[in-house]
Amino acid sequence: MNATESGEYHVYKIKLGNSKDRQVIINMANSGVQVTGHNSDEVIIETNTYKAPPARAEGLKSLYNQVEDNTGLGLGVEKENNTLKITKASREGGQYTIKIPRNASVVYRESTWTGSDFNLKDVAGEIEVKLNNASANLINVTGPVVVNTTNGKINIKFSSLNQNKPSAISTINGSIDLTLPANTQANFKLRSIQGEIYSDFDMNLKKETKGDIPMIGGGNTIEGKTNGGGVEMSVYTINSEIYIRKSK
């Protein structure tokens, strides 16, 4: 279905299959995205904000955007084996909801500094997120998670923590707030240059000494283990606080 005016609902569907190594790669610009895992082998893209090119452009190609819009939603979709790539094919901003198989891995990249916040929930695969001037909100995930933004907050609620690969979470200008089950086993490396670090976990912190003075925090890297230790999780920010809390 091709979009004609902003405000109309449009949907695009494609099957991804049932392979264990299936992956969805999303390359966006000037847009906001909500990714939701669901119990299906389909990827479903929905929007009601797409603005079609002017009628005078009919039969012509956009020179700024080399990606072909083969969805009618301002997006180009390519499938190769078990990987689906979704790429912005229009300079117009938009808001998209993308439903993916729950166990698929996700790579999300925002290429501009004018994108909206990225939201994701109910995904049990690997997650990689790269933002510039936006916040990331992840709910009901297991990881491993690699999330980085330059100017934005990062909020993640883990349903469990995958022990197969390490996770890394970082931002330059924004707080990081992580919620994990109380029985989470992890080796934490934590650092905030100008902020504080707060947690209700027993971290069993590794203390370093300088002369006779124990050194913890103050811009240094804090290393600690929860529940005897486990997979590594590094958390880093420059200008704000880090919160690591037990799920209730």
Image: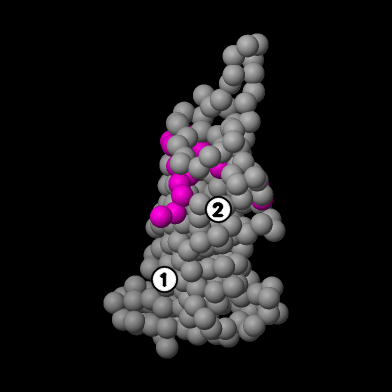
Q: Residue 213: x percent and y percent? A: 59, 14
Q: Residue 133: x percent and y percent? A: 44, 49
- Residue drawn at the location 29% of the way across and 77% of the way down: 7
Q: Nearer the viewer, mark 1 or mark 2?
A: 2
Q: Quadrant of the image for the N terminus?
A: bottom left
Numbered circle sitting on residue 183: 2
Residue kind at label 2, given as amino acid type: Asn
- Residue drawn at the location 34% of the way across and 82% of the way down: 9
Q: Main secondary structure of the magenta part?
A: strand
| Front in this rendered view, residue 86 or 181 | 181
| Front in this rendered view, residue 235 or 129 | 235
- Element type at mark 2: loop
Q: Is the residue marked by circle 1 packed among few (<14), some (14-19), or many (20+) residues within 10 Å?
A: some
Name the side, left or right, on which 4 lies relative to 12. Answer: left
- Report the magenta residues as a range: 231-248
- Element type at mark 1: strand
Residue under pointer 1 = 96
**For residue 81, which quarter of the picture?**
bottom right
Asked whether the viewer can see residue 141, the reply is yes
Seen in the picture, residue 181 relative to 39 is either above or below; the reply is: above
